[in-house]
């Protein structure tokens, strides 16, 4: 089959074991695979290495999109504006990132003339729903390939050993670093840790696990004073009254909020939540800047918002969080 005759698929690609195997598997199935990697602020990610690996695995190209500014302005700040929090605990760090990524993936699919999108989300999690709901809402013609729900794929890859054997067979490079005994999702809004040993609600973890925050015990004893200015619910200026630092650019402001809150031990939670797919899941999250800015916004509302308006907005905030968590970001009811 010539490349002109091959159906095109845009694969949400991370460079990890699962998506690298999926990329090669799709190539073997006759697809022209275009890998797509979204930069939403992953910590210390080498995107040039990810691009090279994608091409070496068989992708016709790898597109890396810097979505950090879009992510902050059109997704994170929207969540902060309505004080969004799921089940009273979770600040939606992964939930808010998925529609940002899915929108760019669909845009690239239309640009490249692809009729398929694919992802490496498991059949037990929320991300499969989020990616597919968003893709369908943005372009109902788009078809989704979900290998971890494909009977043939699951039969071929029953565990990590099968994935590694496939990599060896096809010369796919594998990260030599030991695999963490839990899964990690990173973006500039938060870092999440779940699955593996953390599925035991009684299991503890080392403080070295965290990437964005210090523990409260290790935080400085000296206070830092900050001032946050909002316009229509959106942070527009952050001033560190202690050292005079001022940030007004949305991305720089949010990254600086992460820095301040993180070094002061703000934003860690350890919870069990109800997934949309019907199971309970333990998640350990750190959301430093988001916690800081949400608290500041709620303080501002306490000063200037009418009692009845506040009552109404609390209900709307809960509904926003529920819809976002469940993958309905681009659904009509979110309007």
Image (cartoon, rainbow, N blue to C red):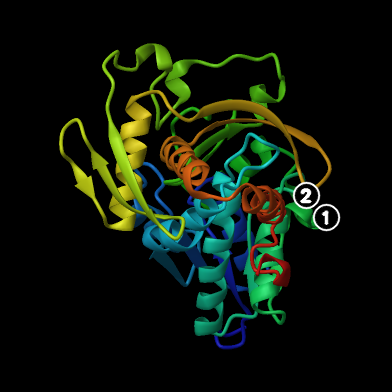
Residue indicated by mark 1: 151
Q: Residue at x 43, y 27 (%)?
A: 266
Within 10 Å of disc 1 (Cα), the crowding (few <14, some 14-19, many 20+) is few
Relative placement, left or right, of 117 versus 111 is: right
Contact (Cβ within 8 Å) of mark 1 with mark 2: yes
Relative placement, left or right, of 254 versus 198 is: left
Q: Is residue 208 above or below residue 40?
A: above
Within 10 Å of disc 2 (Cα), the crowding (few <14, some 14-19, many 20+) is few
Place of residue 24 in the rendered image (x, y in percent of width and height, measured from the top left)? 58, 60
Q: Nearer the viewer, residue 213 or 332?
A: 332
Q: Residue at x 83, y 55 (%)?
A: 151
Q: Which mark is residue 328?
A: none
Place of residue 105 in the rendered image (x, y in percent of width and height, measured from the top left)? 54, 69
Q: Secondary structure at mark 2?
A: helix
Q: Is residue 110 above or below residue 295?
A: below
Q: Quadrant of residue 323?
A: bottom right
Residue indicated by mark 2: 154
Q: Residue furthest bottom?
A: 4
Place of residue 255 in the rendered image (x, y in percent of width and height, measured from the top left)? 33, 45
Relative placement, left or right, of 315 versus 58 is: right
């Amino acid at each position: 089959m010539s490349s002109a005759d091959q159906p095109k698929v845009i694969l949400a690609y991370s460079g990890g074991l699962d998506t690298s195997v999926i990329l090669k598997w799709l190539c073997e199935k006759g697809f022209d695979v275009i890998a797509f990697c979204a930069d939403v602020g992953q910590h210390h990610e080498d995107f040039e290495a990810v691009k090279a690996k994608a091409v070496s695995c068989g992708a016709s190209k790898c597109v890396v999109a810097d979505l950090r500014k879009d992510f902050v302005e059109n997704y994170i700040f929207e969540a902060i504006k309505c004080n969004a929090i799921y089940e009273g605990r979770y600040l939606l760090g992964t939930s808010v990132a998925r529609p940002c990524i899915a929108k760019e993936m669909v845009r690239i699919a239309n640009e490249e003339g692809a009729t398929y999108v694919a992802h490496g989300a498991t059949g037990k999690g929320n991300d499969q729903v989020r990616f597919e709901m968003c893709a369908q809402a943005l372009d109902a013609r788009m078809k989704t390939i979900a290998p971890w729900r494909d009977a043939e794929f699951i039969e071929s890859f029953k565990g990590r050993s099968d994935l590694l054997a496939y990599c060896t067979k096809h010369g796919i490079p594998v990260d030599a670093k030991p695999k963490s005994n839990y899964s990690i999702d990173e973006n500039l809004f938060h870092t999440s840790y779940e699955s593996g040993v953390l599925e035991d609600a009684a299991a503890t973890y080392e403080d070295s696990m965290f990437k964005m925050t210090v523990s409260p015990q290790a935080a400085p004893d000296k206070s830092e004073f900050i001032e946050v200015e909002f316009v229509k619910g959106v942070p527009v200026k952050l001033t560190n009254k202690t050292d005079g630092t001022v940030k007004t650019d949305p991305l720089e402001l949010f990254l600086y909020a992460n820095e301040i809150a993180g070094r002061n031990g703000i934003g860690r939670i350890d919870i069990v939540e109800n997934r949309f797919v019907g199971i309970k899941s333990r998640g350990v999250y750190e959301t430093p800047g988001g916690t800081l800015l949400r608290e500041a916004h709620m303080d501002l509302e306490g000063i200037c918002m009418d009692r009845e308006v506040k009552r109404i907005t609390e209900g709307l905030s809960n509904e926003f969080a529920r819809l976002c968590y469940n993958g309905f970001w681009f659904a009509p009811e979110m309007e």
